[in-house]
Amino acid sequence: MTRRRRVARQAIELGFAAPVVVAQRMLRMAAAGASPSVRDRREMMQMGSEKVAAFWESWYAMAFESMRIGWRASASPWLWWGVAARGLAPWHRRTVANAARLSRTRRRRRG
């Protein structure tokens, strides 16, 4: 798969998964109210910590990819798609995994 297609696929999947994760977490927070359970508090703590972790992972991945391509980027602007792919990957991986995990949790609670 070419870099441009990989970046496009990740961006589209991220665009669909992110609103799902936000909605599920907001519903969970609203349902918990003023006294969240241990499970809800753990999920809320995970929200913040994984965003920080994804930011730094993305930052380092883009920096290392930029250093790897170095001056070759001046010869071909298409190499920068690799930087975008590396930077998007941590956000994509976490968001899609959270969407799947939170969807399973909600279904299990109802059943």
Image: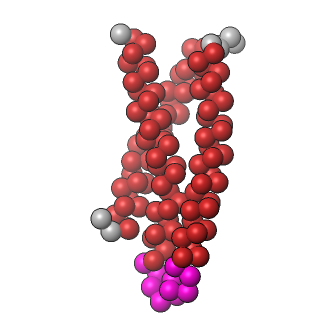
Q: Magenta includes 34?
A: no
**At 44% from the left edge and 21% from the top edge, which residue is drawn?**
105
Query: Which quadrant holds the N terminus?
Result: bottom left
77 in relation to 65, above or below = below
Q: Is residue 76 visible?
A: yes
81 in relation to 101, above or below = below
Using residue 38 as the reference point, say whether residue 6 is left or right of it.
left
Using residue 53 as the reference point, say whether residue 6 is left or right of it.
left
Prevalent SS, magenta region? helix
Q: Which residues are magenta?
A: 69-78
**At 55% from the left edge and 20% from the top edge, which residue is drawn?**
28
Task: From the top left corner, tell me how far across and down residue 35 is, in percent.
Answer: 68, 11
State how the image is colored: secondary structure
100 in relation to 70, above or below = above
Task: From the top left corner, tell me how far across and down residue 17 is, in percent.
Answer: 43, 40
Q: Is residue 15 visible?
A: no
**Of 84 and 67, which appears nearest the observer?**
67
Task: From the top left corner, tell me how far across and down residue 100 is, in percent.
Answer: 40, 33
- Which residue in the rendered view is the most extreme toward the left? 1
73 in relation to 61, above or below = below
Query: Which quadrant holds the C terminus?
Result: top left
**At 59% from the left edge and 18% from the top edge, which residue is drawn?**
39
Task: From the top left corner, tell me how far across and down residue 8 is, in percent.
Answer: 38, 60
